[in-house]
Amino acid sequence: MSHTRLRGFSRSDTSRAEAFSDGVLAVAVTLLVLGLSDPAHRPGGLGHALLAQWPAYLGYLASFGYISVIWLNHHQAFVRIRLMDRGLHAANLLLLFTTTALSFPTAVVADAIQEAPSGTDARVAVALYAGLAAAMCLSWVVFYHQLARRPEVLEPDVEDTYVRHGRLRSWAGALAYGTAGLLGVLVAPLLAIAVFVVLPVFYFLTSEGFPQGRDH
């Protein structure tokens, strides 16, 4: 029996990429909870100790919300993708790379804010978080750029505005996180954290694109 030899990088369906991505995103969310711990306290001081680590709760909220909407938008993307090629695999891996790193700046921000909410370390910490969050947005820019370059990997009935709106949302997020980082460094770290908590709501509300671009 003769066999056809595969040459180069063969395209494939999305099942393995989706399964791997779901697993990585699940791990990324799980890593966040490791930043929440039973605080050291004297007898009778548990309540105060729990309240004192409020920055860890805010950091968890911001990062859990961010990864959750990444998972949602990732799912919405793969509903529209029918084939994977090398470029799309690379773009997807870049997205997962930046996402799994989010637990690190989350822990750094929580520790720095708890130590001194307006201190130098807190300003550096929110800049670190903003930088990585912006990098995650830019990884989506790369992802959508690959879809624009290879429209044949998409389902034939995908909305005409899907890729364009995806790019706009990704650039808007990178700009917003970058601006939040500057506000945190120059004005107040807690202001940046407030933006970090709110921004995932924007991505949730626009997970199907901007309102004027939806099909009715």
Image (cartoon, grey):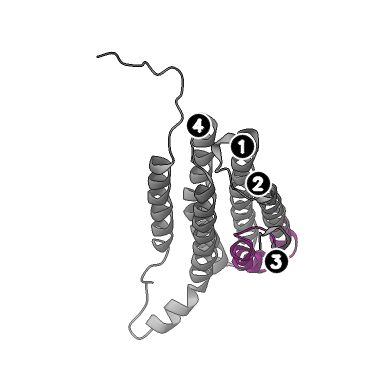
Residue 188 falls inside the magenta stretch: yes
Judged from the image, the secondary structure of the residue bearing numbered disc 1 is helix
For discs 3 and 4, the disc positioned in front in the rendered view:
4
Check if residue 82 falls in the magenta segment.
no
Neighbours of disc 3 within 10 Å: few (<14), some (14-19), many (20+):
some
Report the magenta residues as a range: 182-210
Q: Earlier in the sequence, mark 1 or mark 4?
A: 4
Measure the alpha-carbon separation of dots 1 and 2.
9 Å
Residues at marks 2 and 3 touching, judged by CB atoms closer than 8 Å: no
Q: Helix or strand or loop: what does disc 2 sit on?
A: helix
Please identify the dominant SS of the magenta region.
helix
Residue type at mark 3: give it.
Ala
Image coordinates of residue 94 in percent, x first then y, are: 53, 40
Asked if marks 3 and 1 touch (Cβ < 8 Å), the reply is no
Give how far across and how far down residue 123 sits, in percent: 65, 59
In depth, the one of 191 and 113 nearer the eye is 191
Dividing the picture into quadrants, the one containing residue 45 is bottom left
Residue ID at (53%, 46%): 98
Element under label 3?
Answer: loop
- What is the three-letter code of the residue carrying label 2? Val
Which of discs 1 and 4 lies nearer the camera? The answer is 1
